Amino acid sequence: MNPLFRLNGHLIQKKNSPGGGERKLPGEQSVSVQHIEQLTDDLEGIRSRWGHDNPIGGALFSAHYIRVIAKTNRIKRIFKEPEKTICGARFDDMDGSIKHVFTYFMPMDDLNDAVCCMRECCRVVKSLGMNDISATDMDNLRPIFSRLNTSLNWGRFAGMVVDCYYVESFSIDETTLNLTETSVVTFYKTNADLRELMKSVKVTPFAVDKLDELTFILDKEQFSAVKGKYPYLISMGVTDISELCNDVEMVGTLSDALTIPKPVDEPVIGVIDTFFADTVYFKEWVEVVNMLDSSIPVKDPDDYIHGTEIDSIIVDGPALNPKLDDHCGRFRVKHFAVATNTFSLYSITTYIRRAIAENRNIKVWNLSLGSMLETDKNFISPVAAELDRIQAEYDVIFIVAGTNKPAYKDGSMRIGSPADSINSLVVNSVNMHGQPASYTREGPVLSFYQKPDVSYYGGDKHSGINVCAQYEVVSVAGTSFAAPWIARKMAYLIYYLGMTKEVAKALIIDSALGWKSRTAASASIGYGVVPIKIEDVVQSQPDEIKFYISDMTRQYDAAAYDIPIPAVNDKHPFIARATLCYSTGCNRFNGVDYTETELDFQFGRVKYVDKGYGKVPQIQSIDNNKQDAEDARMYEAEARSYYRKWDNVKCIREVHDGSHRAKKRYERGYWGIDIKTKERTPGPYRKICTFGIVITLKEIKGINRINEFINLCIASNWAITAVDIRSRLSIYNKAEEQLKLE
């Protein structure tokens, strides 16, 4: 096996060059005067509605776009500051095609201005005798526009015409939610005092729990009352009381009395789950914190089973399941009891945040609780959103089970909360043959984000996972029992090998990818099944070169154009794959546009192109990614589908099918990476984003070229360090000894 290497030192970061120019209608597309008038009438109707009875202090309405829309093609000039007034986004697929719907809230003065300017835009086009206006018409009109008798300047006029092309209609939309149980309800952000509005429909505001300034816990009657009078204010809602996903029934009982040594200084994994039974043989390895109110008695023995079983895998999984010995050793557990077999979303989010805030030394957390309910296609669940916020704030990572499909459910079923957490590593289950388990549920999340990330062995009806319950070792199955195996690997990578959570996540996903499949990811398995042994995660085959780069994006562009890759006879005899993972800020109120940061990623050979003022490096990405090329013409939906735009995991790869030939070596023989940072919301400051990239090269003839790679890196002044498992373990143990002496 070849070791994993870290490369450090050559990432160049720079600001974005000014440019972009004037927005234009695409190709020879045109906008009819009739359409502009219809949109104006829509806005006039909205103005009239909010001009008579306005309890929210402004105008709340939605823009329905013609398709999934890129940020650059959102409304720019119809309204004064449209980006600052967006308060929600969803997808509409009523006519069979997916389209963006953005909800805006703005001052009435801004809406009045928009109506007046749209009327003037119609008048100008009509005065020129046009029934519609095309891109060519716009080019011809610009030189003479200043001589027209109009209050509009060219920029506002042209911008509104382009806006009208992308917008299908404006309307005041009302919720279609029909919640019949106590629910978490989120409202659009307006100038309304939500508690006062509740009073107006006889909902006692002080009797209502509140998650944040826009999210409340309402029972069936309260929700019905609020919906009846203010249906336009409700953004999203989900049932608050969730029943835990049931794992597949026990498939056998094993009678073995196990023993275990006392814990010493092993790393600690946090577990968020039901209660822990202190009757088990490994009880000294588990520290229990009861997060529930001490006045609540826990009498049901079943409330102790699930959490105890999860801990048994984290502490002593290989002893219980020798075939799944991952060589990661044992881990201690700090166990936080937050739920019984039913739980409140409101309560569990509070408990999880408190547990993480009070235990900053724990970096890896296992969460194998999950809801029976399917996630919504248009918004992230409250628990998942809280997990994403916590991971961004506290630099931790959650390993989350992908939830189970009940036995009575036929056909596919979407994963349940909180497996829709974007920053978490979400794990589904496969049987011992690597096929989706019978209870497997599917992604994606929000109709787009890839979840689950990976899969692991969680057992199935006829071949289970051995765990320790209260008094005995039993054989069970479920995604609950796949997740803790991955938590063990993440803990090994972070605690013992010193990886960042982004690099560790990228290594886990990269190890599952392999070289065979042309499909980027599966709705049920994710990017693949993670290997059993940790060595297969952090090492590579003799004919492979694996290395990683870790950094933060401080500017728009972060690139390295001088990664030296061995060449033979002026050709690189490799196929390649690369996995990028990064932590992103998220905003649940943005609906389907949930993640705030996009890292556009390229990896491949570097070609120097003459631009007239000199030669500049240009990466020939292995996935042919040309989103930012000068002549790029790509719809937003295509960019999301092909290049995972706005997803915080990106995997690009070539397939080892025997047909690949060595690649031409360009003039300097370098390969490179290029990461461009884009933000959904405008602002003067760019958010710092931590990322990890794992790159694997496979020699097409099976030759080991690791020494050539090392020598080339040294000659190119790269700081290259081999990840030596034994030395890292020794360093960890010595560090713990020093802490003990203090």
Image (cartoon, rainbow, N blue to C red):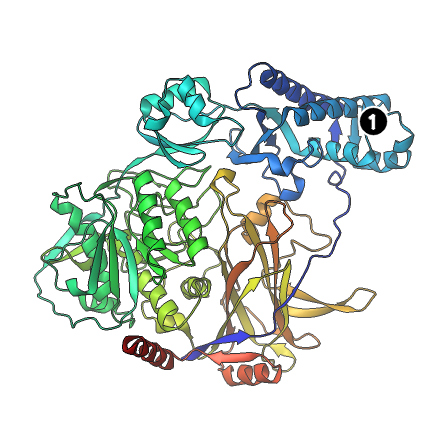
Quarter assignment of residue 551: bottom right
Q: Relative to 64, does residue 696 appear above or below in the rendering?
A: below
Residue that mark 1 sits on: 151
Give percent across and percent down for residue 208. Answer: 34, 29
Q: Farthest top residue?
A: 52
If the image is split into quadrants, where does the C terminus sit?
bottom left
Give percent across and percent down for residue 693. Answer: 51, 65
Q: Relative to 376, does residue 516 appear above or below in the rendering?
A: below
Q: Relative to 493, does residue 152 appear above or below in the rendering?
A: above
| Residue appearing at x 45%, y 17% in the figure | 229
Q: Farthest front residue?
A: 742
Q: Relative to 17, does residue 714 appear above or below in the rendering?
A: below
Q: Disc 1 residue type?
A: Ser
Which of the pair 592/441 is nearer the observer?
592
Q: Can residue 457 be seen in this view?
A: no
Secondary structure, mark 1, is: loop
| Residue appearing at x 45%, y 27% in the figure | 194
